Image (cartoon, rainbow, N blue to C red):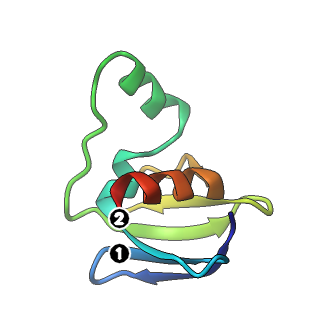
Amino acid sequence: MNPEHIENRARAGILAVRWENGSAHEFTHAALRAACPCSACRAVRRAGGTVEASPAVRLAAIEPAGANALNLAFTDGHARGIYPFALLAELAAVHC
């Protein structure tokens, strides 16, 4: 499933996504940071740890990563996470 529209509500710390099927979801920036799929964050989770994200963390940049993903950079300096649309849809299903 692909997004039809993506809106960053920076002050509120929300990334709003409307999907092509008409459904919509709002992700907090902190939740996206905590779910980072980069290799370093995955290693923390595989070792039984949790990726901590301050509620104050915000998206610093949003860039396309190919045709099916976003590269999200955060104000805490973390900028290595490529978020495939399939992962965002999966996170939306878990958090709804």
39 vs 14: above or below: above
Q: Name the residue under label 1.
A: 14
What percent of the width, then of the height, locates residue 87?
57, 50
What percent of the width, then of the height, locates residue 5?
61, 83
| Residue visible at 43% across and 49% down in the picture | 78
Q: In this view, does 77 lie to the left or right of 3?
A: left
Instruction: Kindly tell me whether residue 76 is visible in this rendering.
Output: no
Amino acid bearing label 2: His
Report which quarter residue 10 is drawn in: bottom left
| Residue visible at 55% across and 46% down in the picture | 80
Circle 1 — which element?
A: strand
Q: In this view, does 57 lie to the left or right of 86?
A: left
Label pair 1/2, CB-CB below 8 angstroms? yes
27 vs 10: above or below: above
Amino acid bearing label 1: Ile
User: How far apart, in angstroms, are the residues tagged by discs 1 and 2?
Assistant: 6 Å
Q: Mark 2 points at which residue?
A: 29
What percent of the width, then of the height, locates residue 66?
79, 59
